[in-house]
Amino acid sequence: MKKTVIENMPDMNQARKRVESIKTIYYNYEPSQKLIDRFKGKYAYIRTFGCQANVRDEETMMGLLSSIGMIKTEDPTKASVAIINTCAVRENAEDKVFGEIGEFKNIKAKNKDLVLLLCGCMVEQKHIIEKTLEKYPHVDIFFGTHNIQDLLRLLDEFITKKSRYVDVSSFEGNIIEKMPVTRIENYKAYVNITYGCDKFCTYCIVPYTRGKERSRDINDILEECKVLVDEGFKEITLLGQNVDSYGKDLKNGVTFAHLLEEVAKLGIPRLRFLTSYPSDFKDDVIDVMAKYPNIMKYLHLPIQSGSDDVLKRMGRRYTSEEYLNLVNRIRAKIPNIALSTDIIVGFPNETYEDVLKTIDVSLKADYTSAFTFIYSPRKGTPAARLVDDVTYEEKNKRFKELVSALEVNFKKHADEMVGKVYEVLVDGESKKNKELLSGYTENNKVVHFKGDESLIGQIVKVKILESHVYSLFGELVDEDSLIKSKCEEIKKNIESSALVKEYLHYKGMIENDHELEQMHNKLLFMKKCDLNDEEKVEYLKLKEEYDNNPIVSNYNRLKKEIDDLKIEVKNLLKL
């Protein structure tokens, strides 16, 4: 068995501290020639579990491996380097990771040169590393979320000393800029704006695994986003455990609303952000979202529970009333906003009445979708020490009741989309049917439709034909059909409008009034003539008499409104 070199082991007490100042470090590691010769032209495999932050970490790790000439593969049996990038938010995720580690035992038996690495949030917990070191000797290197920049150094150390390595630093964290990146997609990109979290919700492991809340410099963020725009990316998602707190630690007056506006002004077709914290979400962000059409009118706003007692025990810093007040302010300025949320059922000692309160608040918030979970205790968090008097069976029953209640609104919103046309960013082939393409609407609904693979990465217009609650089926709409459809819709609305009916009424009255018709014709004739002073006076007197006629004045007023309507129609027809 290989010797194990432990450079750093995770320490929850160290991870809890919030005293150090944050440093920005620019990556500059030079890999050895031995490392390059060993892995250049070889394949790298990365299996990522968990959230978008982990996906973004994968892109950085692949960027580092690509810098020494490695090629990405989706086949672990071809790999010379394999990385399992882990999540620690729920126990279910950890079970999947251990299953994946087990699969690599046979792969490594057939490929003795394969280097297997374990990283991510799971390894920021000491008991996980101890268990893995003991039960899974085929794992060669362990590194934490703060040690991604050390990936090539650790590989260097491993091939030189041929020892297992553990380097998991538990500290508040720094910001590492200018690391190479290999994007998973060439049309959608994640951009970190903050790292870490300082909320310390009693159930959550993230503040310990990801460190202190720290913001990137706005110039570095905008530079990264501008490159993506110039390269033709269609969508950027700004990432942070709590994006709304962006800039607080910088103490330079820069806010998330300011950053969001500056990124929107770069011209990216679609801009999203994840994730928001209710008590930090400010009205200036609502204003920016409402102002810029390229900011998607979709917001993920976790509530976790609708019971104030449970929220207090969770360490959440808002009440259900404050949450709903925020939702109302958002909807007042962005009526078409689509809201999604996170909800935990079965927090220690949660009562059935607490669950009913969650259902009530959720229905009032009117979500289009939600991520719902049964509480999973995380070792080292305050909630994990609570004695719970509710059985898992009862929690599961309450969970099902919540989901059933939520799905009423989910179905309503999905059904309302049928018959309408939406812009869809095409992700690729549908996972369930390779003959279909799939992508997401502005309001984050997945749509499946028939189309050529050349559309992947493009924004196309799709008419929704069927709703299946959690997904939609549609058909591509060509430009001519869309124009015709819009014209028919506008014509129908105009013909039925009170404004047009009133306008046509007065127009008919003028046409059928012989005296007004004579005055109008005389004014037209005089306007074309070269009038003397006396005739000009007569003309102006006649014009005043004509214009002041109640029928004519009403007609002129309505005609101006109709002319304004024509301008609006022209704008609607701009596709």
Image (cartoon, grey):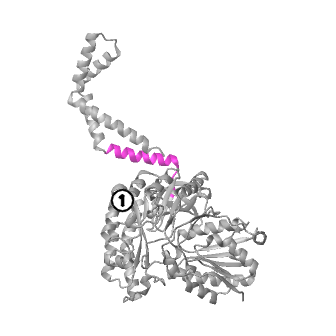
Locate the N terminus and report the quarter of the image it occupies.
bottom right
Name the residue located 21 percent from the left edge and 27 percent from the top edge.
549
Residue 465 sits inside the magenta stretch: no
Q: Position of residue 23 (x, y in %)?
A: 56, 66
Note whether residue 147 is visible: yes
In this view, the residue in front, 21 or 525, is 21
Q: Position of residue 483 (x, y in %)?
A: 47, 46
Q: Is residue 448 visible?
A: no
Q: Secondary structure at mark 1?
A: helix
Residue type at the position of mark 1: Ile
Q: How far across and down, in percent of the image, does residue 573 sit? A: 45, 44
Q: The magenta stretch spans which residues?
A: 475-496
Q: Left or right of 526: which side holds 490?
A: right
Q: Main secondary structure of the magenta part?
A: helix
Q: Is residue 374 left or right of residue 532?
A: right
User: Residue 494 magenta-drawn?
Assistant: yes
Most foreground residue, 238 or 3: 3
Residue wearing tag 1: 330
Total residue callouts: 1
User: Residue at position x 39%, y 65% from top?
Assistant: 280
Compare residues 404 and 81 and report the one nearer the observer: 81
